[in-house]
């Protein structure tokens, strides 16, 4: 929780005192800063040693992931203008969770103009959130098109492979006509990094036409490719892939097995619960057991959601049948 009894000056003094470890309460104080506090922090931010600024942003990123109630929006906006690329990258990575539309202009500029490759790549990833928001009509169509145009330009441009691949992954959410050909080009490129990005984008596409290509990659010699294909099949909820996914529960790679476990929890189907329960009982790894337990909970949610969807469909079907009956009766009366 934020600690309002700590002034910004005390906070800055603690940041600058490099002889002492930073008390976690100072990090919590950075949450939900008032405008005046944010301005005071920004004026002295550059006086904080670089390594401490990096450490603060690293801790903030972890706190944001573990407690979504905390908001470090203000300090991360300051971090976007930091002279250190690591601070800028961490700021972008934390800010992409906030869905703040007013950040789009800054991100559109940073994705092409920032001097650091890692920052540009992270910014390309961050822009994917806004592509998704545009596809679900949460931001203006003109704004969505501006974001997509920039990502298309980056993907087709001359930046590093890492930046261009992240741009393609963000475009995975897009329904623009140019995107499927870019995904196919990456898939057939012969380059494993681009292939993995293509699989990632397929999983975001909500387009089940990719199912055969994804299923083929479950047989890849590369563990990273198998894992990403499995994740994408889960995201698309491809029921026909369940037998192939079940067979991969004995894969010798931990990442592949856990990707398969989660995907099966998203898809469900015959034999899935039994297989996950058996895997849970067989594992001696506590972390793996916790993950499988979470997957079983997600499977229950997926099954309940699927049942509700089926009931909704049946109700709609019954309503249509009732309307047909009324129409038939009216015809008879006539």
Image (spheres, rainbow, N blue to C red):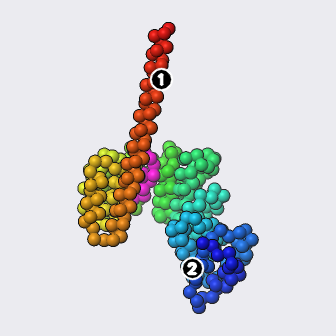
Quarter of the image holding residue 277?
bottom left
Kindly identify which residue carries mark 2. Answer: 24
Q: Which residue is drawn at 29% across and 52% down?
A: 272
Magenta part of the chain: 196-207
Quarter of the image holding residue 186?
bottom left
The reply to whether the magenta stretch includes residue 199 is yes
The mark nearer the N terminus, 2 or 1, is 2
- How far apart are labels 2 and 1 at the CA level? 63 Å
Kindly identify which residue carries mark 1. Answer: 323
Secondary structure under the numbered disc 1 in the rendered image: helix
> x, y percentage for residue 101?
63, 56
Dot 2, how many residues are within 10 Å of its Cα: few (below 14), some (14-19), or many (20+)?
A: few
Where 313 falls versus 331 (above or below)? below
Judged by its main secondary structure, the magenta piece is helix
Instruction: Name the quarter where the N terminus is drawn.
Output: bottom right
> x, y percentage for residue 86?
55, 74
> x, y percentage for residue 290?
36, 66
Q: Which residue lies furthest to the bottom in this view?
A: 19
């Amino acid at each position: 929780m934020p600690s309002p009894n700590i002034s910004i000056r005390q906070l800055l003094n603690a940041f600058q005192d490099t002889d002492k470890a930073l008390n976690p309460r100072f990090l919590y104080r950075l949450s939900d800063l008032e405008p005046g506090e944010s301005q005071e922090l920004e004026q002295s931010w550059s006086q904080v040693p670089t390594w401490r600024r990096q450490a603060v942003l690293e801790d903030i990123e972890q706190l944001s992931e573990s407690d979504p109630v905390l908001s470090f929006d203000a300090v991360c906006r300051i971090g976007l203008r930091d002279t250190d690329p690591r601070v800028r990258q961490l700021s972008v990575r934390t800010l992409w969770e906030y869905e703040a539309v007013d950040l789009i202009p800054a991100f559109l500029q940073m994705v092409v103009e920032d001097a650091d490759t890692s920052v540009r790549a992270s910014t390309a990833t961050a822009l994917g959130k806004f592509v998704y928001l545009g596809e679900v009509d949460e931001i203006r169509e003109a704004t969505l098109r501006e974001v997509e145009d920039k990502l298309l330009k980056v993907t087709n441009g001359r930046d590093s492979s890492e930046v261009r691949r992240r741009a393609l992954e963000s475009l995975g959410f897009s329904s623009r006509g140019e995107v499927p050909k870019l995904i196919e080009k990456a898939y057939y490129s012969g380059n494993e990094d681009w292939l993995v990005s293509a699989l990632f984008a397929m999983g975001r596409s909500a387009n089940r036409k990719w199912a055969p290509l994804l299923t083929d990659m479950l047989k890849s010699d590369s563990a990273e490719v198998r894992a990403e294909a499995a994740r994408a099949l889960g995201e698309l909820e491809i029921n026909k892939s369940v037998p192939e996914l079940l067979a991969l529960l004995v894969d010798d790679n931990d990442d592949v097995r856990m990707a398969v476990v989660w995907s099966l929890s998203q898809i469900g189907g015959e034999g899935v619960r039994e297989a996950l329960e058996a895997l849970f009982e067989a594992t001696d790894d506590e972390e793996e057991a916790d993950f499988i337990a979470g997957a079983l909970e997600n499977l229950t949610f997926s099954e309940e959601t699927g049942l509700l969807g089926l009931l909704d469909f049946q109700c709609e079907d019954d309503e249509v049948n009732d309307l047909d009956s009324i129409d038939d009766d009216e015809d008879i009366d006539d």
